[in-house]
Image (cartoon, rainbow, N blue to C red):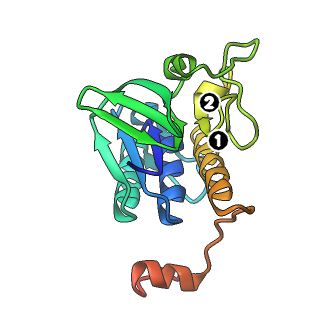
């Protein structure tokens, strides 16, 4: 059993996984590599001057891997349901459980609907500012919560918001993920880029 299951490996899903794992929550991501980022070229993403979307995804995957996220590359999720004190996720290869689930499946809302998440009048998943849905401890991120307002930076922010809310619940107080140079030195063994 893992602490957080993330369904989807685009900017939203991998951001959620990164924030959760680096702050002590064991995280598993199911990534079928169907992200729209493979069709994108980034030049409006903060911190990136100009980069191919696929190259960006490789960088982001390496980053989550380096923090210890268990990434199930190519393992498609076929179902999700409430189970005991959390959620059961079914894939072609088996079943997994976690107290929290983050849905980051782009514009596909099928799993959210299967789970019983409320939809808005526009037909998108109804999520609050923390990205939590009407189903406690289930989060929806990115394109599934917006009608045609899809953007990589927003999706990554949604994933971060979901992870921070989960971390706040787990720690019993508002959790902030704000790193300082000493944190980077600790995480990367003094290999911090000062530029």
Read off the residue under disc 2. Answer: 150
Q: Nearer the viewer, residue 97 or 68?
A: 97
**What residue sits right under mark 1 in the picture?**
154
Q: Position of residue 194 (x, y in %)?
A: 52, 83
As drawn, 45 above or below 75: below
Q: Quadrant of residue 66?
A: bottom left
Q: Is residue 83 visible?
A: yes
In the image, residue 55 above or below residue 101: below
Q: Residue furthest front?
A: 84
**How far from the left and from the top, in percent, is residue 58?**
34, 50
> In screen coordinates, is 14 left or right of 170?
left
SS state under label 1: helix
From the top left corner, tell me how far across and down residue 142 is, in percent. 59, 34
Residue pictured at 74% horizontal, 63% vertical = 173
- Residue located 28% across and 41% down the image: 73
Q: Residues within 10 Å of mark 1 (few under 14, many from 20)?
A: some
Q: Is residue 147 above or below residue 56?
A: above
147 with respect to 89 (left or right): right
Above or below: residue 92 compared with residue 132: above
Q: Position of residue 32 (x, y in %)?
A: 33, 32
């Amino acid at each position: 059993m893992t602490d957080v299951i993330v369904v989807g490996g685009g900017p939203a899903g991998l951001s959620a996984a990164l924030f959760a794992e680096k702050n002590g929550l064991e995280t598993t991501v199911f990534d079928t590599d169907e992200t729209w980022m493979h069709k994108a070229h980034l030049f409006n993403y903060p911190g990136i001057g100009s980069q191919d979307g696929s190259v960006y995804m490789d960088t982001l995957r390496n980053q989550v891997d380096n923090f210890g996220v268990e990434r199930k590359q190519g393992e498609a999720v076929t179902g999700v349901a409430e189970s005991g004190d959390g959620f059961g996720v079914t894939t072609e290869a088996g079943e997994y459980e976690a107290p929290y689930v983050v849905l980051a499946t782009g514009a596909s809302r099928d799993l959210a609907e299967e789970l019983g998440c409320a939809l808005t009048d526009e037909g998108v998943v109804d999520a609050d500012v923390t990205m939590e849905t009407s189903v406690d401890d289930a989060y929806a991120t990115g394109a599934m919560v917006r009608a045609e307002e899809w953007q990589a930076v927003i999706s990554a922010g949604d994933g971060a918001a979901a992870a921070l809310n989960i971390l706040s619940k787990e720690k019993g107080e508002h959790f902030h993920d704000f790193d300082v140079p000493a944190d980077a030195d600790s995480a990367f063994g003094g290999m911090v880029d000062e530029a």
